[in-house]
Image: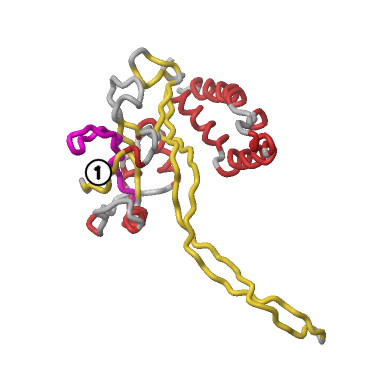
Amino acid sequence: FSTKVTTWVVDLLLAKLFPLVWNENLIYWKGREKTDVENVEKVRKFMRWVIVEDLRLADTIKQLLEDLLIDGTFAVKIHWQVFYKWVQRKFTEGLKEKIVEGVKRIFRTYRTKYEYKRFEKAVVERVPIDDVLFPWYATNLEDYECIHRVYYTYNQLEELQERGYIINVDEDLITGIDEKRKNLKGGEKVKVEEEGFLPHDVKEREAPTECLEGYITYKVNGRLVKSVFLIAKTARRYLSGKPLVKVSRIEEKPIFVWPFMSRSGRLLGTSIAQL
C-alpha cells in the first residue's frame, strides 16, 4: 500500500519553488557601455527571445528543480552546439510575361538553391546525475576529474568523424543493441516498457552506443594538462582527445553539479525522499 506522500510533497514544493527562482518578467539587462544604453530596448527584446524561445530555460529549470527534490542533486551541462542543416534559398532571376484570363501580367521568376549551412547555438542541457561519474570524496567538480556518460548512434558518430571531430569510426563499431534501453532501471525502465519499446526494435545504425566523455588531467610533453577525451565504452575504442582549453578558454568543465541540501565533504546532496 502506497500513500504517495513523497510524490505529493515533491509536487507541492515544486509548485512553490519554481515561481520563486524563475520569473521571465523580472529579468533585466543593464548596459555596461554607452552604446549598450542606447540599444537597451533592442537587447531586452532579443535576450527575452533567446531565453524564452531559443534556450527554453523555463522547462530546463523546472527539470533541474525536480532533480533537486527527488535525487538531492542536479547536474547541468552548458556548452556551444554546432550543427548543420540543408537550407532552401530563392534567387530572383528576372521578369516573365504571362497572360492570365486574357490579361497580360508580369511575374518574377526564381531559382531555387539548396545549401548545407552551419549553425551554432548555446545549449543548457539537463544531465541525469547518474550519468556524471566522479570520486565519492569529491566536494566540487572543478578540483576533481569526472566522466560524463553520453550516448551516440553510429550515424551521429560517423557525422562527427566526417566533420573532423573524432576518429576510429567504422562498421565494426556498430553494436546492434540499444544499450541505453537495455540497461535502464527503476522508474525509467517502467516508462520505456509502458511505451512499448524493446532493444530489437532499434536498427543497428540507430542504436545508441554508450560513450564516456572524460574530463581528466593528462601528461603532455612532461606537463600535466587538463584534457577532455571521448571513448566508445563497449568497443573500447579511442575516439578523440584534446586540451580542455580548446573547449573552454578558461579551462572550465562544462558540467556543473549542485546539491539540494549539502552534506559535509560530499558533492551529492540529500533529497526530500531521503528525509
One can see residue 203 in this view? no
25 sits left or right of 165 in the view: right
- The x, y position of residue 123, in whole percent, is 48, 41
For the C terminus, give its image quadrant.
Answer: top left
Q: Residue furthest front?
A: 34
- Left or right placement of residue 8 versus residue 40 in this view: left
Q: Position of residue 126 (x, y in %)?
A: 45, 35
Residue indicated by mark 1: 233
Q: Residue at x 69, y 37 (%)?
A: 38
Camera-side residue of 253 and 198: 253
Q: Classify 47 as above or below 204.
A: above
- Check disc 1: other Cα within 10 Å, few if <14, some if 14-19, many if 20+: some
> Which stretch appears magenta?
206-229
Residue at point 57%, 66% (across, down): 89
**Disc 1 residue type (three-letter):** Lys
Instruction: Say if the magenta span includes residue 228.
Output: yes
For residue 152, above or below residue 135: below
Q: Is residue 71 left or right of residue 8?
A: left
Secondary structure of residue under mark 1: loop
Residue 266 in sight from this viewpoint:
yes
In percent of the image, x 73 and y 84: which residue is there?
A: 97
Work out whether residue 260 or residue 14 is closer to the camera in this orientation and state it: 260
Figure quadrant of residue 135: top left
- The answer to which quarter of the image holds residue 269 is top left
Q: How many marks?
A: 1
**Residue 210 position in % (x across, y down):** 30, 44
